[in-house]
Image (cartoon, rainbow, N blue to C red):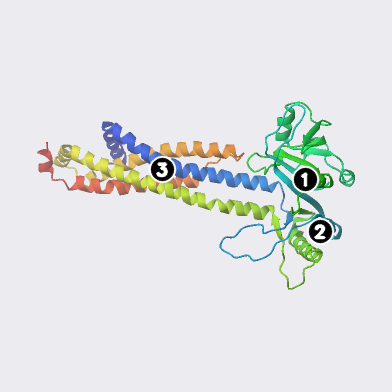
C-alpha cells in the first residue's frame, strides 16, 4: 500500500464516523487556534511597539526622577528625588552639547476639557512643555502652530491639542483660535497635533499642551516632577551625551562623587526592548494553553481510535485474511489519527491567523503571517496524531484474523 492509499482509506474511515471526527478536530483546532492566535498577536504587538518607538528615533533620551524600569529581582535602595523647574532650567542652560533640550511635565491624566460644542471624557493628559517638546517626542503639527519660546516667557493662555481631543470637542469644525476650558481657565487653541497610533500613543491623541509657565499657575502640585528630554544631533554620540548629561545633572543636584546617582535615563530603544521582553510571559501562557488543550485532544482522539478499532474488528480481520501485514494495519490507523489531527490543525491555523491579526489590527499593528508558528502547529499536530494513534494502531495490528472474522 502506498502513502496515498493510506490517506484515502483514512479519509473513508473518517467519513464513516464523521460526528466523532468533527468533535475531535474541533478540540485540536481550539488548541492550535490558541497557540497560533496568541503568538500571531504577540508578533503584531512587537512590530507595533518597534514601529511606534522608532518614531522617537535612536538619538533621544529622557532624564527622569526614578528608575526607568522596575526589576523585581533586584533591590534598589536609591533615593530618587523630584526634578524641579530650577534644575530643568539649569540643565538646559549648562548642557553645551550638539542637541535639543526640552523641559516638560504631566499635570494630569484624567482632566476634562470643554469647548462651546462638547465636553471630553475625563481622560485628557494635560502637559506643560516648552518650545522643543514636539522635536523630542517625534510629533508634528497637523493644523495651526506649536508653542513658541515667547509663549513660554509671556505665560500665554494658549494650547495645542491632540487629534482625538480635537475630534471630540469640535467634530469637524476647525478648532484653531477657538476657546477651550479646563480647571476653570480658558485657553486659545493654536494648533492640532497629527494623529499617532492608537495602541501606543500614550495619550498623545488625547493631550492638551500648554506652556509650562502657564500650567504651573493652575495645575502644578507640590512634589510633581519634571522630565528633561534630550535629542542629540548625531545618534552615534548618544552614549557620550548621556555621560555628559550625567555629570552636568549630578552637579546641579549637588551630588558628591561618593553619592549614588538619584535619577535615571529612559530611551526609546530601551523602553521598546523592555516592553517586548515583557510579552514573553504571554508566549509562555500560549504554550501552556495549547499544551493542555492538545493533551486533552490526544486523549480524546486515542479513545475514539480505540473505539474505532473495536467497531472495525471484522474489517481488520478481513484485511488480514486477504494478506494485509501487521505493518500495513498499523500504518493505516496511524494515518487516520494523523489526518484527523492535521484537519483540526488546519482549521486551528486559519482561526488563529484571523484572531491574531484581528488583535494586531486593533493595536495598529501590521498583518502577520508567522510561518514559524504555523510550521510548529503542523509538527505538533503530527506528534499528537502519532502519540494518540500508536496504541490503537498496535492493538489493531495484533488482532488475530480468525478471531476478528468471528467477531460480532
Does residue 120 appear anywhere in the picture? yes
Q: Earlier in the sequence, mark 2 or mark 1?
A: 2
Q: Residues within 10 Å of mark 1 (few under 14, many from 20)?
A: some
The residue to which callout 3 is attached is: 31
Does residue 335 appear anywhere in the picture? no
Question: Which of the pair 65/276 is nearer the observer?
Answer: 65
The residue to which callout 2 is attached is: 87
Left or right: residue 288 versus residue 57 is left
Q: Residues within 10 Å of mark 3 (few under 14, many from 20)?
A: many
Using the rendered view, name the quadrant where residue 318 is placed.
top left
The residue to which callout 1 is attached is: 219
Q: Residues within 10 Å of mark 2 (few under 14, many from 20)?
A: some
Which mark is in front, 3 or 2? Answer: 2
Real-space Cα distance between discs 2 and 1?
Answer: 19 Å
Real-space Cα distance between discs 1 and 3?
Answer: 51 Å
Quadrant of image for the N terminus:
top left
Residue 229 rendering spot, x and y as whole percentages: 76, 53
Amino acid at each position: 500500500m502506498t502513502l496515498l492509499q493510506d490517506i484515502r482509506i483514512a479519509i473513508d474511515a473518517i467519513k464513516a464516523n464523521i460526528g466523532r471526527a468533527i468533535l475531535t478536530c474541533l478540540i485540536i483546532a481550539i488548541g492550535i487556534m490558541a497557540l497560533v492566535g496568541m503568538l500571531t498577536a504577540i508578533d503584531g504587538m512587537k512590530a507595533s511597539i518597534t514601529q511606534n518607538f522608532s518614531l522617537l528615533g535612536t538619538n533621544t533620551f529622557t532624564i527622569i526622577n526614578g528608575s526607568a524600569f522596575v526589576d523585581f529581582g533586584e533591590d534598589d535602595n536609591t533615593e530618587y528625588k523630584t526634578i524641579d523647574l530650577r534644575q530643568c532650567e539649569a540643565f538646559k542652560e549648562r548642557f553645551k552639547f550638539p542637541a535639543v533640550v526640552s523641559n516638560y511635565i504631566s499635570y494630569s491624566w484624567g482632566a476634562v476639557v470643554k469647548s462651546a460644542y462638547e465636553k471630553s471624557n475625563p481622560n485628557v493628559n494635560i502637559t506643560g512643555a516648552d518650545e522643543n517638546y514636539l522635536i523630542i517626542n517625534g510629533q508634528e503639527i497637523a493644523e495651526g502652530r506649536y508653542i513658541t519660546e515667547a509663549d513660554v516667557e509671556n505665560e500665554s493662555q494658549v494650547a495645542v491639542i491632540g487629534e482625538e481631543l480635537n475630534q471630540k470637542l469640535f467634530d469637524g469644525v476647525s478648532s484653531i483660535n477657538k476657546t477651550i476650558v479646563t480647571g476653570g481657565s480658558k485657553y486659545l487653541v493654536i494648533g492640532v497635533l497629527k494623529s499617532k497610533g492608537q495602541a501606543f500613543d500614550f495619550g498623545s491623541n488625547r493631550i492638551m499642551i500648554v506652556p509650562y509657565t502657564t500650567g504651573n499657575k493652575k495645575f502644578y502640585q507640590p512634589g510633581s516632577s519634571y522630565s528633561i528630554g534630550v535629542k542629540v544631533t548625531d545618534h552615534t554620540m548618544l552614549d557620550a551625551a548621556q555621560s555628559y548629561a550625567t555629570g552636568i545633572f549630578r552637579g546641579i543636584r549637588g551630588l558628591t562623587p561618593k553619592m549614588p546617582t538619584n535619577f535615571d535615563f529612559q530611551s526609546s530603544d530601551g523602553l521598546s526592548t523592555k516592553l517586548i521582553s515583557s510579552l514573553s510571559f504571554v508566549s509562555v501562557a500560549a504554550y501552556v494553553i495549547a499544551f493542555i488543550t492538545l493533551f486533552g485532544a490526544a486523549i480524546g482522539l486515542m479513545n475514539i481510535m480505540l473505539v474505532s478499532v473495536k467497531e472495525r474488528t471484522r474489517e481488520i480481520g478481513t484485511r488480514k485474511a486477504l494478506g494485509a501485514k501487521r505493518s500495513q494495519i498499523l500504518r493505516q490507523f496511524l494515518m487516520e489519527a494523523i489526518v484527523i489531527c492535521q484537519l483540526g490543525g488546519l482549521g486551528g491555523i486559519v482561526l488563529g491567523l484571523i484572531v491574531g491579526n484581528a488583535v494586531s489590527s486593533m493595536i495598529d499593528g501590521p498583518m502577520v503571517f508567522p510561518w514559524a508558528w504555523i510550521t510548529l502547529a503542523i509538527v505538533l499536530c503530527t506528534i499528537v496524531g502519532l502519540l494518540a494513534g500508536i496504541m490503537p494502531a498496535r492493538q489493531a495490528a495484533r488482532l488475530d484474523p480468525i478471531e476478528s472474522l468471528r467477531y460480532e
